[in-house]
Amino acid sequence: MGEIYQKFLKESAKKAFDLEHRYKINYNIGKYNEAVLKGKKQFRDIELARKRAAFLKHRIINNLEKYLIEFAANFEKNGGKIIWAQDTDEATHEILALLHKNNAKQVVKSKSMTTEEIELNEVLEQNNIEIVETDLGEYIVQIAGEKPYHIVTPAMHKSRDDIAQLFHEKFNTPRESSPEELTNYVREKLRKKFVNADIGITGGNFLIADIGAVCITENEGNGLMSTAFPKIHIAVVGIEKLIPSLKDMDLFWPLLASYGTGQYITVYNSIFSGPRKEGEIDGPEEMYLVLLENNRSEILKHEKQRNALTCIRCGACLNACPVYKNIGGHTYNNTYSGPIGSVISPHLKGMQDYKHLSFASSLCGSCTEVCPVKIPLHEMLLDNRNESVKLGYSKLGEKISISSMNTFLSKRKRMDMFSPKLKNIGMQLIF
Ligand code: SF4
């Protein structure tokens, strides 16, 4: 049994019996469920919206090269510079080189799962560069020394009391501070960071091919501030985040908002089409986009699993998943958790080490049901299982029990050779 698998088994068994954790997650997901019901009502025909979004994302994934070339040409025409990064090392190496070249010591960063994927914070800290998370949820997990718990709501596992206690320990704020007081406290702190930062780093929710722009959607204005003050803006985005045209945003913005947080539209939606132009008073002097491949082509190679690249990272499948709700986000020990994480991680990080995630599912299909871009997640988990067996990663005991079951259950006569009692004992032994 691999080390990562053993860790997963141990931590998931522990978390599943942690009633306090279960209460907090159920409470927060309960609030989310109520909001999403309202958010979805803005669509006259939600099924049509989902089908259209799936169609557009499929068109991208099936013509990725064409759209990447179109996007890159337009982005560069706007004055932006593209850094093509094959993997984590290349991405972090190039970002570090840029920071060193500009003698950067302070970086502000808005929420980005792609930077989590390349572990950018750790790399910058090792190089004595201060990196401050500016999204409130990310800021909370950063000061707690944790990884994001959820791809949309990173501090979902913490109650307001947990956060007040954390701030009390770290900054000596009053133990009974309200969420508003804590938010104001962070706001004050971050303002100074925004003003003094040398470089702002963001992710990107969408890359708009026809205008060569990076689109960021967020609720706090911190993404905007991270790019407005520093002289250089670096965006780090996966190659699959493309959408064909600016006009498609009228579908993707409300869809992401409804499924991600239950809003009609997220509060701040910014489109960055390169650095500040002559005569403009705002924006960075230089803009770089790190386009990350990091094994996405591995997923693209698979006719079925390539569907997973159409994901818009709304987090709905995590909130719907009974396994996620019981074992929690951190147990996956991975940037992308929940059903979508279980589908893509074995391909992004290696089937041998991460195949167990595809088996950690009840296959209830809730994830598929809630996905705004209609990714058949539970079927893809089965495809991953199939692939891992074909690659010879299943254990000997598993192989013996499955082939014995096959032998006995495929013929009624064989089953009837044993009494019901013996059959039950046999099944118990196998499972
Ligand atoms: S797989 Fe679907 S539901 Fe899950 S995060 Fe992606 S878009 Fe959202």
Image (cartoon, grey):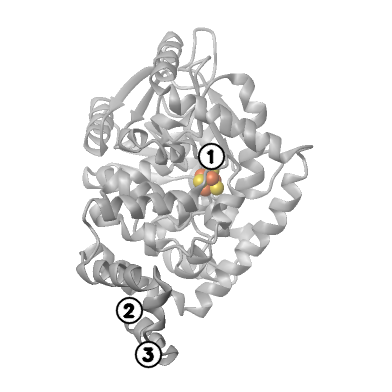
First of labels 3, 2 by sequence position: 3
First of labels 3, 1 by sequence position: 1
Q: Which residue is the site of mark 2?
A: 430
Q: Position of residue 122 (x, y in %)?
A: 28, 48
Secondary structure under the numbered disc 3 in the rendered image = helix
Residue type at numbered disc 1: Asn
- Left or right relative to 130: residue 47: right
User: Cβ–Cβ below 8 Å for labels 3 and 2?
Assistant: no
Q: Which residue is the site of mark 1?
A: 222
Residue 154 can be seen in this image: yes
**Inter-mark Cα distance, 3 to 2:** 12 Å
* Residue nearer the viewer, 198 or 242: 242
Q: Which residue is the site of mark 3?
A: 422
**Inter-mark Cα distance, 1 to 2:** 54 Å
Q: Which residue is rendered at x = 38% and y = 20% of the image?
A: 65
First of labels 1, 2 by sequence position: 1
Q: Position of residue 37 (x, y in %)?
A: 73, 52
Callout 2 crowding tier (Cα within 10 Å): few <14, some 14–19, many ≥20: some
Residue type at numbered disc 2: Ile
Q: Which residue is rendered at x = 41% and y = 54% of the image?
A: 382
Residue type at numbered disc 3: Leu
Instruction: Select label 3 or label 1 by which is in front.
Output: 3
Secondary structure under the numbered disc 1 in the rendered image = helix
Callout 1 crowding tier (Cα within 10 Å): few <14, some 14–19, many ≥20: many
Secondary structure under the numbered disc 2 in the rendered image = helix
Quarter of the figure that contains the C terminus: bottom left
* Residue nearer the viewer, 274 or 71: 71
* Residue nearer the viewer, 40 or 367: 367
Instruction: Select label 3 or label 2 by which is in front.
Output: 3
* Residue nearer the viewer, 40 or 118: 40
Q: Position of residue 16 (x, y in %)?
A: 45, 75
